[in-house]
Amino acid sequence: MALKITEDCINCTACESECPNNAIYAPGVKWSLAEGTGVRGKFTLKDGTVIQAEERFAAFSNNNYYVVSAKCTECQGFHEEPQCVSVCPVDCCVSDENFVETAVQLVTKKELLHP
Ligand code: SF4
Ligand code: SF4
C-alpha cells in the first residue's frame, strides 16, 4: 500500500529528494502526476478518476510534508525499503490503510509511472 506522512512530521525535508517517484511534496506545494514520472497526458487514478498528468493539484497539507498516494509504490522497482521510512528522523512515514495495494499491484503501478 502507499505510505502517508503523519502530523508528527517536523518538515526536515530529508525524505523529499529520496523518493524515486517524486511522490513527496512540501507543505502547500501543488502536486502533479507528471512530475518525476514518465506519465504524460490522460491518466486514470485508482478510483477511476481521469486526470491530466501535467495538471497541478492543490496540496493535501499546508502544514506538513505529504505523500501523493497515486505516485507512491513503496519504492518498488527502485529500492529494497521505502526510502522515506529509512531517512525520516521521527518515524512519521507509515502505511496508508486507506490505500491498500498488493506487492504485485505496486510493481504494476511502478511500470505505469515509468513506462
Ligand atoms: S515509499 Fe518510496 S515511493 Fe513511497 S513516498 Fe516513500 S520514498 Fe516515495
Ligand atoms: S523525513 Fe520525516 S520529518 Fe522529515 S520531512 Fe519527511 S516525513 Fe517530515
Image (cartoon, helix red, strand yellow):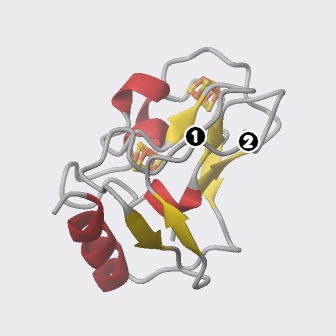
Callout 2: SS:
loop
Q: Which residue, given by chain and number where applicable, does mark 1 sit on? A: 31
Corner quadrant of residue 50: bottom right
CA gap, disc 2 and disc 1: 7 Å
Of 86 and 19, which appears nearest the observer? Answer: 19
Would you say residue 2 is visible in this rendering? Answer: no
Placement of 12 over or under 85, stated as above or below: above
Name the amino acid, label 1.
Trp
Query: What is the x, y in percent for residue 113?
Result: 29, 60
Query: What is the x, y in percent for residue 56?
Result: 59, 42
Of 84 and 24, which appears nearest the observer? Answer: 24
Q: Which residue, given by chain and number where applicable, does mark 2 sit on? A: 58
Is residue 103 found left or right of 50 in the rendered image? left
Of 106 and 34, which appears nearest the observer? Answer: 34
Query: What is the x, y in percent for residue 66?
Result: 66, 40
Placement of 43 over or under 55, stated as above or below: below
Placement of 110 over or under 108, stated as above or below: above
Of 49 and 7, which appears nearest the observer? Answer: 49
Labels 2 and 1: the sequence-earlier one: 1
Question: Which residue does the image show at 57% across and 79% down from the upper left?
Answer: 100
Is residue 40 found left or right of 79 in the rendered image? right
